Amino acid sequence: MAKVCDRTGLNPPNTYADVLAAIEALHNPPEMFGFVAATKIDEGFMSQVLEHVFLANGVSPVDENGFAPLEEAATIEVLEFYKALADASPPGELYWKQSRELYLGGNAAMIIWSPFILDELAGLRDAAPVTINDDPTSRDLAAVTGIVTSFAGPSNPDGAAWADVRYFGITSDADFDAAQAFVEYSMSEGYMLTLSMAPEGKFPVRPGTAANPTEYTDAWSLLPVGVDRKAPLSELYAPEMMAEIVGGLSTAQRWGVAEGQLSLASKMINAQVFNRLVREYMDGVRDGAATVALLNEELGAIE
């Protein structure tokens, strides 16, 4: 969206309102869809996208005591916003595949996607070619793409980002000393080796050391990304874009983590209650208030 914002006077899509304004200005199907929303209810991709959209408006199904009934007004704001995204999307059962293909083809103004798309935007992967022109290795799309990691709904002006943090685990029957030494190495002098396995999707949760607070983020930006061709992210994206990508970790959230209820929140997500009932709302099966009531009923039964 970067160059589009410059040309049209649109704000970057940092809020629900900014996203809707961009859709209003740019939606012109079939040449350009304003958005590609996730609508396929049996895909984890829809769960991830929905959680980010709910978090952006400050809505969570858990608190420190367990299940927390969804507040009706804020949840209806989420439902109405997501329906607007779906209305600006192509018809059909949509998930990550269509989102990526339409954006790489220049037929989608905005998508919510994993950072694993960063190398593909620059034409570095033959299995996911850029098709905005006749050169599938073109870096033109990366050059005009803006990245927003955190955005805000009307009931949560501070907004939120979504992130999936990966951990090392040591089993109870492991050689603890050897495993502990490996973890310490992997998170310190071997950290770049750890991140080098698909660095476009592995951001350093450790930005640096006491002696050099940006040591790891600086080194990460120089790691080569890509499959069939390689280039460092710092060569593909401007410094301010790199700062936005890494900065998203400072506001990243997941349902249940801060409240100590990640296990319960994960059960709710995996039950696909949100996917199914949000999709039914978008399809006109029931209105917003009834959808919130049914969400609370079904979520409240999960233990």
Image (spheres, grey):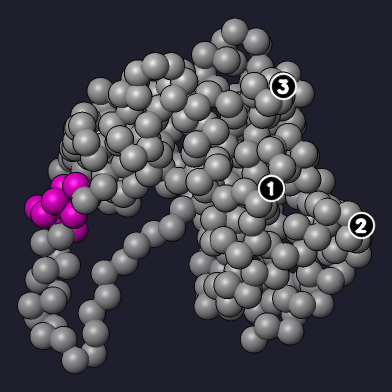
Which residue corresponds to the image point at 52% horizontal and 14% vertical from the top-left?
3
Residue in the foreground of this view, choosing between 13 and 177: 13
Quadrant (top left/top right/bottom left/bottom right) for the N terminus: top right
Mark 2 or mark 3: whose residue is earlier in sequence: 3
Label 3 CA crowd tier, 10 Å (few <14, some 14–19, many 20+): some
**Residue extent of the magenta highlight:** 187-196
Which residue corresponds to the image point at 59% horizontal and 8% vertical from the top-left?
7
Amino acid identity at mark 3: Asn
Which residue corresponds to the image point at 46% horizontal and 53% vertical from the top-left?
163
Amino acid identity at mark 1: Gly
Q: Is residue 130 above or below residue 43?
A: above
> How far apart are the alpha carbons under marks 2 and 1?
21 Å
Query: x, y (%) of residue 54?
Result: 67, 53
Pointer 1 with pointer 3, Cβ within 8 A: no
Mark 1 or mark 3: whose residue is earlier in sequence: 3
Label 1 CA crowd tier, 10 Å (few <14, some 14–19, many 20+): few
Determine which quarter of the picture holds residue 229.
top left
> How far apart are the alpha carbons under marks 2 and 3?
28 Å
Residue of label 1:
92
Query: x, y (%) of residue 62?
Result: 66, 71
Labelled disc at residue 287: 2
Mark 2 element type = loop
> Left of 293 or right of it: where is 44?
left
Residue of label 3:
28
Task: Find out whether residue 194 is within the magenta segment.
Answer: yes
